[in-house]
């Protein structure tokens, strides 16, 4: 195994750990049951979730999941 393979492996482990932490840090999706009962809230925070903590966590989770897929493919191609 080359040094580059070890570097990609370490980065992959860091991405995996960060992805697990971010998924566990996110809030659950309880809005679905509220919509059935007719108690949907149209507040400022529900409309601007992209700028809130939850929105940022969601965006970072998407980026880390893409990195997870890319590093998984790279490490399994045996290029190094």
Image (cartoon, rainbow, N blue to C red):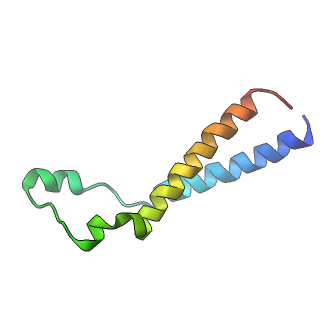
**Measured from the top left, where is residue 61 in percent x and y?**
51, 53
Q: Please, which residue is most extreme toward the right here?
A: 2
Residue at image location 49% in from the left, 56% down from the top: 59
**Measured from the top left, where is residue 44 in percent x and y?**
26, 73
Is 10 situated left or right of 19 in this image? right
Is 8 situated left or right of 24 in this image? right
Residue 6 lies in what quarter of the image?
A: top right
Which of the two residues, 53 or 10, is positioned nearer the viewer here?
Answer: 53
Is 22 situated left or right of 73 in this image? left
Residue at image location 28% in from the left, 65% down from the top: 47
* The C terminus lies in quadrant: top right
Is 60 situated left or right of 36 in this image? right
Residue 79 lies in what quarter of the image?
A: top right
Q: Please, which residue is most extreme toward the bottom here?
A: 44
**Measured from the top left, where is residue 50 in percent x and y?**
40, 63
* The N terminus lies in quadrant: top right
Residue 66 lies in what quarter of the image?
A: top right
The number of callouts visible is 0
Residue at image location 25% in from the left, 56% down from the top: 30
- Above or below 63: residue 42: below
Q: Please, which residue is most extreme toward the left here?
A: 38
**Measured from the top left, where is residue 49 in percent x and y?**
35, 65
- Above or below 36: residue 25: below
């Amino acid at each position: 195994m080359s040094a580059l393979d070890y570097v990609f492996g370490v980065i992959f482990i860091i991405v995996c750990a960060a992805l697990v932490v971010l998924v566990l840090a996110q809030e659950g999706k309880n809005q679905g049951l509220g919509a059935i009962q007719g108690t949907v809230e149209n507040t400022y925070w529900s409309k601007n979730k992209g700028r809130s903590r939850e929105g940022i966590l969601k965006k970072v989770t998407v980026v880390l999941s893409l990195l997870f897929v890319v590093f998984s493919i790279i490490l399994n191609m045996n290029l190094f």
